[in-house]
Image (cartoon, rainbow, N blue to C red):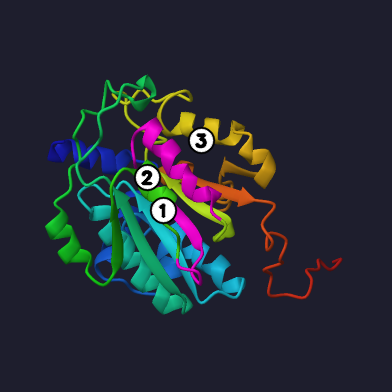
């Protein structure tokens, strides 16, 4: 994109140019609280921050001192490194430990014959990882789980005292996303899990519809018979009322497990809420 195109785009984007400039400044020089900057989208990958922050608030309100956040589809590792930055800022602000785990094959997108995997757009082997470089970058900050997600999800469990609270889905394929949903069948999760889907929106080349990719995976997940047993579901998050609309709002979903033992635990800090007659 040329400089002129970028200037035109910035000047005509729904978010005012002054807001974009302020966000850029706050990302470079983080003034104020993390929650304030998050509310202004003045953090890198605000969707990652939103899911992690509000999962951490839920976990803390339920009495946990630790929680786990997962990224499916690490690829080059920029998202995982960013997640570690959010982790540090949120731990400092909320006083709760956050464990970061990244799942990836390590060898790029697998070969597939399923047409729902957007084979017309995603070449096999794309997004291969430089494992040594990434492991050096995240040492002591995150755990990396490598292998076929269908296998690794079955054997992985969050630490007993750190339930799963947020998930970033960036696996591109319908089949891989469906396999990753196995993590939501585990018992050690929060009653409500914040989820980000990287491939809900796209570009003309993606040609996304409701019957391919992540949207089809979500649809089939909600239709599975197990949903009746767990009394759970995945749904778009309708929580952004009162905030300036951002494109990434459409990428945030919530997983609710109504059968969770703590689902009905009231997290309000008030004894009861009242509205006085004026």
Q: Is residue 111 above or below residue 154?
A: above
Secondary element under disc 3, as helix, strand or loop, is helix
The answer to whether the residue labelled 2 contacts the one labelled 1, judged by CB atoms less than 8 Å apart, is yes
* Number of numbered discs on residues: 3
Dot 2: within a 10 Å radius of its alpha carbon, few (fewer than 14), some, or many (20 or more) residues? few
The range drawn in magenta is 159-186
- Residue 43, given in percent of the width and then of the height, sits at 34, 61
Tell me if residue 168 is in the magenta stretch. yes
Secondary element under disc 1, as helix, strand or loop, is helix
Nearer to us of marks 3 and 1 is 1
* Mark 1 lies on residue: 155
Q: Is residue 124 above or below residue 72?
A: above
Residue furthest right as drawn: 277
Secondary element under disc 2, as helix, strand or loop, is helix
Q: CA distance from mark 2 to mark 1?
A: 7 Å
Q: Give the label on residue 218, or none.
A: 3
Residue 154 visible, this angle: yes
Give the residue drawn at x 73%, y 75%.
Answer: 270
- Residue 103, given in percent of the width and then of the height, sits at 32, 51
* Mark 2 lies on residue: 151
The answer to whether the residue labelled 3 contacts the one labelled 2, judged by CB atoms less than 8 Å apart, is no
Dot 1: within a 10 Å radius of its alpha carbon, few (fewer than 14), some, or many (20 or more) residues? few
User: Which quadrant of the figure contains the N terminus?
Assistant: top left
Q: Is residue 271 left or right of residue 79?
A: right
Tell me if residue 26 is in the magenta stretch. no
Give the residue drawn at x 21%, y 47%.
Answer: 106
């Amino acid at each position: 994109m040329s400089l002129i195109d970028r200037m035109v785009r910035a000047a005509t984007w729904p978010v005012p140019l002054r807001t974009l400039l302020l966000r850029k400044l706050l990302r470079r020089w983080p003034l104020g609280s993390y929650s304030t900057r998050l509310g202004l989208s003045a953090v890198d990958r605000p969707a990652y921050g939103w899911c992690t922050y509000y999962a951490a608030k839920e976990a803390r309100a339920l009495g946990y001192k630790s929680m786990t956040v997962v990224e499916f589809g690490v690829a080059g590792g920029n998202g995982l490194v960013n997640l570690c930055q959010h982790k540090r800022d949120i731990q400092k602000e909320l006083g709760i430990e956050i464990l970061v785990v990244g799942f990836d094959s390590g060898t790029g997108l697998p070969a597939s014959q399923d047409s729902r995997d957007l084979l017309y757009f995603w070449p096999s082997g794309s997004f291969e990882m430089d494992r040594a470089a990434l492991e050096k970058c995240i040492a002591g900050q995150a755990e990396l789980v490598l292998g076929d997600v269908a296998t690794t999800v079955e054997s992985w469990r969050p630490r007993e005292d750190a339930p799963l609270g947020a998930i970033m889905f960036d696996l591109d394929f319908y089949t891989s996303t469906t396999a990753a949903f196995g993590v939501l069948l585990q018992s050690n999760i929060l009653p409500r899990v914040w989820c980000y889907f990287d491939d809900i929106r796209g570009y003309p080349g993606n040609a996304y519809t409701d019957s391919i990719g992540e949207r089809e995976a979500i649809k089939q997940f909600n239709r599975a018979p197990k949903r009746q047993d767990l009394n759970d579901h995945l749904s778009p998050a309708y929580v952004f009322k009162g905030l300036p609309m951002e494109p990434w709002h459409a990428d945030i979903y919530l997983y609710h497990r109504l059968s969770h033992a703590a689902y009905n635990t009231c997290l309000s800090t008030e004894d009861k809420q009242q509205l006085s007659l004026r």
